[in-house]
Image (cartoon, rainbow, N blue to C red):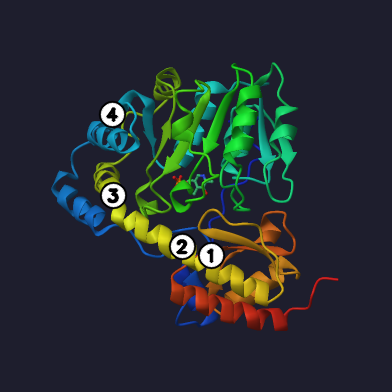
Amino acid sequence: MQPKSTIVHLPVYQPGKPIEEVKRELGLSEVIKLASNENPFGSSPKAKEAIQAEIDSVSLYPDGGAVELTAALAAHLGIQPNQILFGAGSDEVILMIARAYLVKGDETVMATHTFPQYKHNCEIEGAVSIEVPLKDGKHDLPGMLAKINERTKIVWVCNPNNPTGTMVTRAELNDFLQQVPQHVLVVLDEAYIEYTDSEEFPDGIELLPHYKNVITLRTFSKIYGLASLRIGYGVGHPDVIHSINQVREPFNTSRFAQAAAKAAVKDQEFIAYCRKMNAAGIEYMTGEFRKLGLSYYPAYGNFIMVDVQRPAKEVFDALLRKGFIIRGGHALDFPTKIRVTVGSQEQNAKFIAALTQVLDEVAVQA
Ligand SMILES: *Cc1c(COP(=O)(O)O)cnc(C)c1O
């Protein structure tokens, strides 16, 4: 048996250690995970009620077309139902886009470093990923534009960018999109957009009438707090949505995910609360970083990448021993930086106290 040549070198995704295992191994009674950009406030109570109400239908297949959820979301976003498609997380929408659009030898352009699933899925399809380094943690859109040629099928723009948290502005994005040729699909990943209220931050949905070749990805995993249910979506031109639907599995989102997402969309009060708490958390954490003399990238999501001026792996390990799970930049090619999710006020204060101690314990990188 021989698996396809495009996958033999791919690593199997290594998830972080679960909280319970870290507790046991290190003998800790409390472990705070600020590693996966999950919502510290959980999810809307209305979403939890909606899940419970579905329990007795567990033996029935879900609605493959997610008709009710599509209608609720289309109304919320002010768009048509044929402009939306759902995936088992936006991860699956990324997979479906690659599957629908890429064949061996195609090229796709993306930033390095950005969300790893773009490159992963492009490689599986045999496409060549052209990676354009970030500038000051930001997408270099003119640099990406310069890499587009007649073989280019997809350009990926993650806004705000994961793992750096930086933003591409409305003006920068418009300037870019006006120059991208029509044969190229631009994927705009807005997994964290609900967290920002910056005037300069572009909204992919508003671009819909102007650009047929843009698809915007969003998710219920981040501010909506439904990560375990696996549901995200893409919004684009009906023709693009149709092509992606042609490769979609018939029942790719569960009954529970659809019901919870539908209820969650209708509870915008919860979203506004989370947005406000997150903004306060960013202000607090960045203020503390400045007091500690640490620089950080401007943060437009619910996470901050901060330069700890010390080997990231050592800082990661020292924080872990104190019961904090974060993302160390050593795994992401940022040797002296860490990425930390903004938690609740209490979690943020505990994290800053632990980080302050760790900075004393770990020697500065020469
Ligand atoms: C978390 C995340 C996603 C995917 O989330 P799903 O849980 O698969 O919906 C997509 N893009 C970025 C940039 C993310 O951070």
Identify the residue position indicated by label 3 in the image.
Answer: 264
The spot of residue 132 in percent (x, y) is 73, 38
Q: Secondary structure at mark 1?
A: helix
What is the spatial separation of the Cα atoms under label 4 and label 1, in whole angstroms?
38 Å
Q: Residue at x 67, y 54 (%)?
A: 332
Q: Quadrant of the N terminus?
A: top right
Q: Which label is found at residue 65? A: 4
Neighbourhood count class around disc 4 (C-alpha, 10 Å): few under 14, some 14–19, many 20 upward: some
Residue type marked 3: Ala
Q: Secondary structure at mark 4?
A: loop
The answer to whether the residue labelled 3 contacts the one labelled 4, judged by CB atoms less than 8 Å apart, is no
The answer to whether the residue labelled 4 contacts the one labelled 1, judged by CB atoms less than 8 Å apart, is no
Residue type marked 4: Gly
What is the spatial separation of the Cα atoms under label 1 and label 2, in whole angstroms?
6 Å
Identify the residue position indicated by label 1 in the image.
Answer: 282
Sequence-earlier tag: 4 or 2? 4
Neighbourhood count class around disc 2 (C-alpha, 10 Å): few under 14, some 14–19, many 20 upward: many
Q: Secondary structure at mark 3?
A: helix
Neighbourhood count class around disc 1 (C-alpha, 10 Å): few under 14, some 14–19, many 20 upward: many
What is the spatial separation of the Cα atoms under label 3 and label 2, in whole angstroms?
18 Å
Sequence-earlier tag: 3 or 2? 3
Q: Quadrant of residue 285?
A: bottom right
Sequence-earlier tag: 4 or 1? 4
Q: Residue at x 64, y 27 (%)?
A: 126
Q: Is residue 3 visible?
A: no
What is the spatial separation of the Cα atoms under label 4 and label 2, in whole angstroms?
33 Å
Of 191 and 330, nearer the camera is 191
Neighbourhood count class around disc 3 (C-alpha, 10 Å): few under 14, some 14–19, many 20 upward: many
Sequence-earlier tag: 3 or 4? 4
The spot of residue 135 in percent (x, y) is 74, 46
The residue mark sitting in front, 4 or 1, is: 1
The spot of residue 45 in percent (x, y) is 24, 59
